Image (cartoon, rainbow, N blue to C red):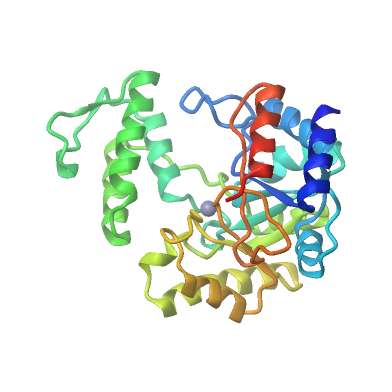
């Protein structure tokens, strides 16, 4: 009740604001390699808190409210990026249990058996029987130990940060080297299938575009960036047989992952709104083509609510 009262007071003084939360995966069980990743038990707890503090509304309704200047007080939306299959199998039943909806932004190139580059590295290191990995080709002087869980965890941190910023073709080569050295069998059901995208919609969830191959738009030629955005929307529209009006920028940091020209592009392609990953709450003066998102990482109710409240009142 304290949190609801605090949100009500802030919105009475400063005007209503829209909080948008962002998630990626909801694991069935905690993952020893990523102990901070959200699992079902934790997601259930978070959604219970959010639903008690905020009025959770569909993103389309929130964007229409921002445009028309009629937003419910304490409005919040829940979003997911990338299109993991656990969004349908694990997150949707929990969202339903708490009677709230969410919007799922899908990178369409990975539907039906695809695996994103970071997950190809993660699954390779998870499965490998090697005790160490030769990464001299990455400039590592010594082989990286990968036998134990702590070793795998630090190997992943090193590999992902070294590979992340390589240009796409070199990144592909690097990922290929790791997967073949590890002899891993990549999962075919990590991401949503076409049928599961339809099931998300049938469960009354929103679906939005998130490009085809999840590139950093700022690194692409403008015509390729436009194709990535438009093609992912067209694919989803063909799957669902209805208009798709929302977009989320991959990685989403303004000025780094996407630029003002991409914001114009999304608007000119006819989208109703788009989401970044810049933190803060959204106001009537916010651009609906660069809506902010935020998710606290804290585990206790008090810390979680405190961080959400400071995001809510931030001046940005
Ligand atoms: Zn993403």
Q: Image quarter for residue 238?
A: bottom right
The residue depicted at 58 percent of the width and 24 percent of the height is 30
In-front residue for pair 297/280: 280
The residue depicted at 74 percent of the width and 27 percent of the height is 45
Task: Find residue 104 and report its horizontal and vertical position in percent.
Answer: 67, 54
Residue 100 in view of the camera: yes
Q: Image quarter for residue 217?
A: bottom left
Work out which quarter of the rendered image holds the N terminus and state it. top right
The residue depicted at 81 percent of the width and 63 percent of the height is 65
Task: Find residue 224 and report its horizontal and vertical position in percent.
Answer: 42, 75
Residue 75 in view of the camera: no
Q: Is residue 171 left or right of residue 127?
A: left
The residue depicted at 82 percent of the width and 40 percent of the height is 9
Task: Find residue 259 and report its horizontal and vertical position in percent.
Answer: 45, 67
Task: Find residue 110 and report its horizontal and vertical position in percent.
Answer: 52, 57
Residue most extreme to the left: 141
In-front residue for pair 84/307: 307
Q: Image quarter for residue 300?
A: top right
């Amino acid at each position: 009740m304290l949190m609801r009262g605090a949100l009500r007071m802030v919105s009475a003084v400063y005007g209503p604001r829209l909080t948008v939360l962002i998630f990626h995966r909801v694991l069935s069980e905690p993952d020893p390699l990523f102990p901070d990743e959200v699992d079902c038990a934790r997601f259930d707890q978070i959604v219970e808190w959010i639903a008690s503090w905020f009025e959770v509304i569909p993103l389309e309704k929130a964007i229409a409210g921002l445009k028309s200047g009629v937003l419910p007080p304490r409005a919040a939306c829940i979003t997911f990026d990338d299109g993991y299959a656990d969004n349908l199998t694990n997150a949707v039943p929990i969202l339903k249990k708490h009677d709230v909806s969410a919007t799922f932004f899908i990178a369409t190139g990975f539907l039906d058996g695809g695996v994103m580059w970071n997950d190809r590295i993660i699954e390779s290191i998870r499965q490998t029987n090697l005790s160490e990995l030769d990464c001299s080709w990455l400039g590592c002087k010594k082989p990286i130990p990968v036998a134990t869980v702590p070793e795998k965890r630090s190997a992943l941190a090193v590999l992902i940060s070294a590979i992340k910023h390589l240009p796409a073709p070199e990144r592909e080569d690097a990922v290929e080297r790791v997967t073949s050295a590890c002899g891993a069998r990549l999962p075919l059901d990590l991401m949503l299938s076409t049928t599961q995208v339809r099931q998300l919609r049938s469960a009354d969830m929103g679906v939005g575009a998130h490009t085809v191959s999840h590139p950093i738009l700022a690194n692409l030629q403008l015509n390729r960036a436009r194709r990535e955005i438009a093609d992912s929307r067209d694919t989803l529209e063909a799957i669902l047989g209805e208009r798709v009006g929302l977009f989320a920028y991959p990685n989403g940091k303004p000025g780094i992952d996407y630029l003002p020209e991409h914001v114009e592009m999304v608007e000119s392609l006819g989208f109703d709104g788009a989401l970044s990953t810049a933190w803060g709450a959204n106001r009537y003066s916010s651009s609906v083509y660069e809506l902010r998102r935020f998710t606290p990482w804290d585990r206790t109710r008090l810390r979680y609510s405190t961080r959400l409240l400071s995001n809510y009142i931030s001046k940005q």
